Amino acid sequence: MKPARKMEAGRPSRLDGRDAGPPLVKGRKLLKRPKLAVWKFASCDGCQLGLLDCEDELLALTEEIEIANFVEASRAVVRGPYDLSLVEGSITNSHDSERIHQVRRSSRFLVTIGACATAGGIQALRNFKDVKEFVSIVYARPEYIETLSNSTPISDHVRVDFELRGCPINKQQLVEVISAFLNGRKPNTPPHSVCIECKQRAMPGDAMAASDRSGRVTAAMDDGRVIEIKAGDIFYIAPGHDSWVIGEEPYVSLHLMGASDYASHKP
Ligand code: SF4
């Protein structure tokens, strides 16, 4: 049983100080029009929507690169191989555990985007329970459901060149990652989540109790548990956790206790 990983804004892997191969540009001129592919595995599509939401940047991008395979945006598919593949979602069934190898073989660079692809996502909650029990509760005909007992990140299956973390991903960071790979350089993204900034200042952000007023937030406990808190919940989070906002809706909570110590310096 593998616990879900903690999420950070971005984690360089293969490009961290190593050769990215010959760049696709020389000076300001593209050596060829690179092909971009976007792949979906088990996910909510929110990170792909983040790419579509880039709008102006996406239009500029289509002048520089060929969006060759992005079924959420267009049914037209250009055959691979692809210069850059963006992969959303985790591996949750045997078909996808084979398909991801085909994607890897057809991709010069493979970048995973979002918490599902980099850590297993919310669907990795099954990793701590019996998935058959979930299936029997959710589906009228559970015998039709073929699924793996664990939800695993893409890097558990194939070599990944870069992980862009978040739920959903930050669209400016996504544009930066695409631009970096096209130019053969390391992406310039923060290596940690916002919560780390408090911890770096010795402001641990430990225990608190609050009534959540709007938005959603996730808390990843140091023991591997991942808790999602939504509007209307009353909760207590013990010391030793990391957390981040889910989606675009602002997160507002009313602190009932613990606020005097929250994110404050500790001797
Ligand atoms: S990381 Fe979050 S937004 Fe992205 S596909 Fe997974 S659940 Fe959706």
Image (cartoon, rainbow, N blue to C red):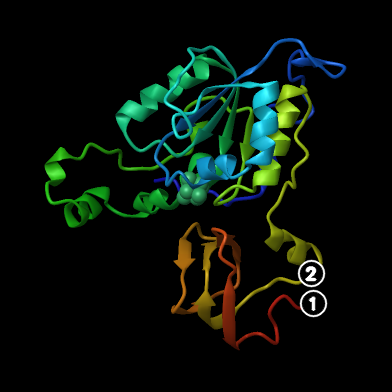
Tell me which residue sits at (45%, 43%) in the image.
Answer: 45
Contact between marks 1 and 2 (CB within 8 A): the answer is: yes
Amino acid at circle 1: His
Amino acid at circle 2: Ala
Tell me which residue sits at (20%, 40%) in the image.
Answer: 145
Where does residue 264 sit, x and y in percent of width and height? 76, 78
Tell me which residue sits at (76%, 22%) in the image.
Answer: 184
**In this view, 81 is above or below 156:** above
Nearest the eye: 71 or 199: 71
Q: Distance between the residues labelled 1 and 2?
A: 6 Å
**Is residue 258 left or right of 137 when viewed as pictured?**
right
- Residue highlighted by disc 2: 202
**Is residue 92 left or right of 30 when viewed as pictured?**
left
User: Earlier along the polypeptide chain: callout 1 or callout 2?
Assistant: 2
Residue 232's tag is none
Where does residue 217 sit, x and y in percent of width and height? 53, 66
Where does residue 130 sit, x and y in percent of width and height? 27, 52
Q: In which quarter of the image is the C terminus?
A: bottom right
**In this view, 255 is above or below 181:** below
Where does residue 266 sit, x and y in percent of width and height? 78, 78
- Residue highlighted by disc 1: 265
Q: Which residue reaches farthest right?
A: 27
Tell me which residue sits at (46%, 75%) in the image.
Answer: 231
Q: How crowded is mark 2: few (under 14 residues within 10 Å), some or many (20 or more)?
A: some
Tag 1 secondary structure: loop
